[in-house]
Amino acid sequence: MRSFTADRRSQTLTQVARETGLDRATARRLLLTLADLGYVTSDGRSFELTPRTLELGYAYLSSMSLPEIAQPHLQSLARELNETAALAVLDGDEIVYIALVQSTRLMAVKIGIGTRFDAYTTSMGRVLLAGLPDAELDERFARLKLEKKTDHTIRSPQTLREEIDKVRKQGWSLVDSELEEGLRGAAAPVRDRAGQVVAAANVSVHAGRTTPELVERDYIPAILRTVRLVEADLVSAVTR
């Protein structure tokens, strides 16, 4: 896994063998094992690390520039709103936090880099699900089991699908007390140069400090501005 770097995010079997000093047969066997464990993905020709490598440390973060690009913008967002700001990606049916600026005002929620939550219960998760093609989203819904996290958690697949369709149309998500009672989150998608959703940025607040209407009026525009800045820097980093 250490052979994957910021300059070598995607490698063929031959490249991995060369960088590691292993013969092709050994490199192939190890890569297939990592793929079976969920740490590596392949399109049939090249291999890339997955967010699951966060469980083993920070190899994933070192192989990508997105968290580093987003961090200063998240810091500005958190400072502007005096709330916790984060960036997450989709891994299976869960979101994984890859960047975070924690506010002391949200001490009840224990989150950090690598923290995972069911995607359907979170604003970032719904943004990321909304970015999937219909066929893939249908496949996920076919196996999805909705568990009750709070009294507000959506339990109906139809209602959840309607919420995701709404997120697609408006370009942001607002989830109120579905993951944890009293926790309100708002998120927007981060897109790459091709327009594909690669991550989601959000702000989390205690429900007692604001209302959904205020979050939509004051917080979401700030999140959308932050996302645009991250996207601009992401495109710039790719084209340099």
Image (cartoon, rainbow, N blue to C red):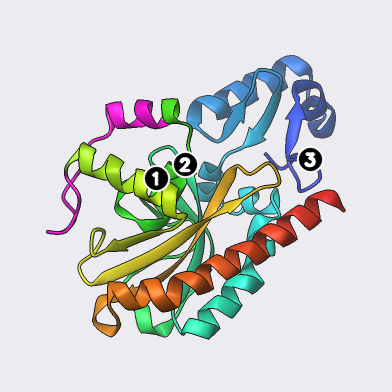
Provide residue 191's location: percent of width, then percent of height.
61, 50
Query: Is residue 137 left or right of 85 when viewed as pictured?
Result: left
Q: Earlier in the sequence, mark 1 or mark 3?
A: 3
**Identity of the residue furthest to the left in this view:** 151
Check the image and report above or below for 133 versus 120. Answer: above
Residue 108 within the magenta-colored segment of the rendering:
no
Looking at numbered disc 2 in the image, what kind of residue is underneath it?
A: Asp
Query: How far is the residue under mark 1 from the one under mark 3?
Result: 26 Å
Q: Is residue 119 visible?
A: no
Query: How far is the residue under mark 3 from the one under mark 2?
Result: 21 Å
Residue at image location 63% in from the left, 44% down from the top: 195
Q: Quadrant of residue 230?
A: bottom right
Looking at numbered disc 3 in the image, what kind of residue is underneath it?
A: Arg
Query: Is residue 148 left or right of 29 when viewed as pictured?
Result: left
Query: Is residue 192 left or right of 97 when viewed as pictured?
Result: right
Residues 158 and 26: in front is 158
The residue that disc 2 covers is 91
Q: Is residue 39 visible?
A: yes
The residue that disc 3 covers is 8
The residue that disc 1 covers is 94
Residue 153 within the magenta-colored segment of the rendering:
yes
Report the span colored magenta: 137-155
